[in-house]
Amino acid sequence: MNFPSAICHLPSAPRILIRGTNWLGDAVMTTPALLRLREKLPDTHLTLLTPEKLRDLWLHHPAVNETISFAPGDTVFSVGKKLRAGKFDLALVLPNSPRSAIETWLAGIPQRIGYARPWRNFFLTQTVPPRTDAVKMQKRSTAEIEALVADNSKLKTQNSKLAPSAHQIHEYLHLAAALGANPEPLAPQLFVTPDEVEAAKKKFGLDKISNPIFGLNPGAEYGPAKRWPVEKVIAAAREIQRQTNCVWLLFGGINDASVANQIDSALRTPHSALRNLCGKTSLRELMSLLKLCRVLLTNDSGPMHVAAALGTPVVVPFGSTSPELTGPGLPGDPRHRLLKSDAPCSPCFLRECPIDFRCMNGITVDRVVEAVLQCSGPATAG
């Protein structure tokens, strides 16, 4: 198997546990590393430890043999006990948290590999040094933001010249390389079956629609600084619908209900040009419907990553976060449009803007409309 020399005494058919990440977007960004592991270890049993809310993400995924899930109330001790029953030979710990390393230690897994980080190195048998290309997502202080805005000459952000290797997918690929996997990047990939897509179409009344289907995802779990203003979303969606005769599928979670209802009220017509699916889909149904969309207009969010990994083009206004570090798909993928303003304080990585939200307000409706039309193909309005 050509494991590194630090990894020894493995049986011929080892059982490997991969401790997965806790957030939807991060989980999608781990798929290139998992696919590279499967490529390197085609006959090895790979088990993924994942939060219960993300368990169904991995159905039909070729990199994973099985999943073990944990609920929000599970402790490190209950997770460790659950893992102990799996009799794993090795654990690859993808998150950087102390808890994720402690879980594998409590499980008695003899070899435990992960990045070297404070408060957890004791619980790992092999620590991997940080990558030389790694870029920390450092939050800006209000004072720093105000200073950048005051100096109009500083229009180049800290990420303006980042290499593609700075992207988060390389963090996970580098860890997979500790098991001998190829560290070269792949596009993140998720999988749904044609039957799942057909079932979702029927459930949500889309099986008789001949209009192009576009997706709209106006929320973002992290905070309001990642959300393009709702009045701009409404204006762009209305103009795109006028030009393409599309049907909008409005996505979101329970916490997005207020903004979804606002958009629904503004865009709904007697001809039902919008379907408000906010809070109404399971994860697999969300994936199937995103696969169905010709394009998704979205904020930087988990569904953004899911759509891109399913092959759906995405258009994304970026403000407080960095497309160079956590953008959808493989860096530079021409199918997607990642839009930024010239705000000198962007990215700040804050949940809320402490000044005037110029990073998002600087992205115009016309620019977003043009990007969506470019991604969606020829207009179909009659």
Image (cartoon, rainbow, N blue to C red):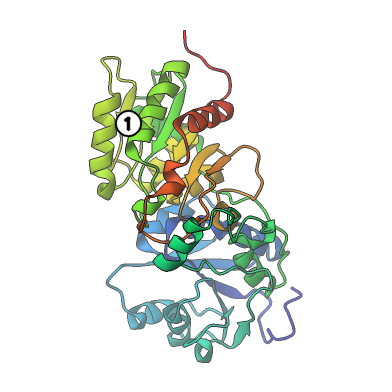
**Residue 250, x across and y down, in percent:** 35, 34
Quarter in which the N terminus is drawn: bottom right
Q: Can see residue 311?
A: yes
> Residue 360, located in which quarter of the rendered image?
top left
Along the viewing direction, whichever of 202 and 283 lies nearer the viewer: 283
Residue lying farthest to the bottom in this orientation:
122
Identify which residue is drawn at 33% across, 43% down. Answer: 252
Identify which residue is drawn at 44% across, 56% down. Answer: 24
Compared to residue 313, the image places residue 272 above or below, namely above
Number of marks: 1
Compared to residue 163, the image places residue 285 above or below, namely above
- Give the crowd class for mark 1: few <14, some 14-19, many >=20 residues within 10 Å: few
Along the viewing direction, whichever of 187 and 217 lies nearer the viewer: 217
Compared to residue 242, the image places residue 55 above or below, namely below
Instruction: Determine whether the residue tagged by mark 1 lies in a helix, strand or loop.
Output: helix
> Residue 310, located in which quarter of the rendered image?
top right
Q: Amino acid at mark 1?
A: Lys
Q: Is 161 placed left or right of 104 in the picture?
A: right
**Residue 124, x across and y down, in percent:** 54, 86
Q: Is 120 placed left or right of 199 in the picture?
A: right
Compared to residue 109, the image places residue 242 above or below, namely above
**Residue 261, x across and y down, in percent:** 24, 35
**Residue 121, x across and y down, in percent:** 53, 88
Q: Which residue is mark 1?
A: 203
Q: Can see residue 141?
A: no
